Image (cartoon, grey):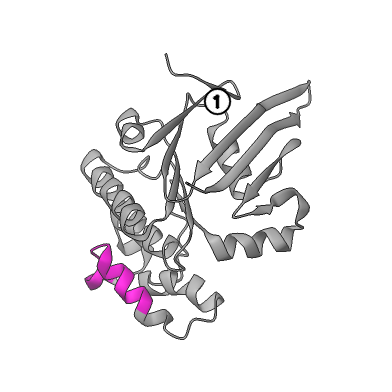
Amino acid sequence: MSESVIIASHLSKVVQTSEAELTILDYVSLDIERGSSVAIVGASGSGKSTLLSLLAGLDLPSSGDVQLAGKSLGALDEDQRAALRAEHVGFVFQSFQLLGSLTALENVMLPLELHGRRDASERARLLLSRVGLAERTSHYPRQLSGGEQQRVAIARAFASDPAILFADEPTGNLDAATGERITELLFELNREQGTTLVMVTHDARLAERCQRAVHIQAGRLVQPA
């Protein structure tokens, strides 16, 4: 029987604006199976990225709970949630979020060094080779194209063998051909390493390649038309 690696129960997120309360997510429940690929789709402003942040423990809901890798995020303090993410989770963002003062190799080594891995350099080189950047290890982000930067970000995300990879519009800043290569890479790593892939995307073709698509509209899960 498949095992759920993420269980979201009755999640709501309400924020106070200067004028009124704004409901961003409204009573969302969701199970995600280990090793699966799931797309979160919906219009801009529908609550996709907020849901991703709650599932990853980057933000806390106004009500409801998320169990991530068997732990209730609401029962943990901020340091404990950070430790849980460090152990189980990788992230790929639309904006790459590489450190400009570090080379490609050093960016990928960083999470490994934080884990105390003695083979950090060797593993980082292997991952950069895996994403086709063996010749670019000493380059800084400013010396890399957008697609190359995103490949460094993917190598970094997979450095610590995460059980779950969260990707927020991972191809949003890339041209079509580069985006296709990044997509192939994400699904390849999902298949080969059994990593659960949870992806926010507005790209219908990308969503179709996932085993499952979750549609969100005005903060609520809906069935696609």
Query: Which of 102/160 is in front?
Result: 160
Q: Is residue 156 above or below residue 138?
A: above
Q: Residue at x 42, y 55 (%)?
A: 195
Quadrant in the rendering for residue 173: top left
Which residue occupies the extreme top position in the image?
A: 225
Seen at 42% across and 83% down, the residue is 119
Identify the amino acid type marked 1. Answer: Ser
In the rendered image, which quarter contains the C terminus? top left
Q: Residue at x 46, y 86 (%)?
A: 118
Indicate left or right for 16 with 182 as reference.
right
Query: Could you say which is closer to the camera, residue 175 or residue 59?
Result: 59
Q: Is residue 132 magenta?
A: yes
The residue most toward the front is 1
Vertical placement of 129 versus 4: above or below?
below
Crowding at label 1, few (<14), some or many (≥20) Cα neighbours within 10 Å?
some
Which residues fall within the magenta stretch?
123-136
Residue bearing the label numbered 1: 46
Residue 86 horizontal/vertical position (percent): 57, 64
Percent across and percent down for residue 75 are: 77, 52
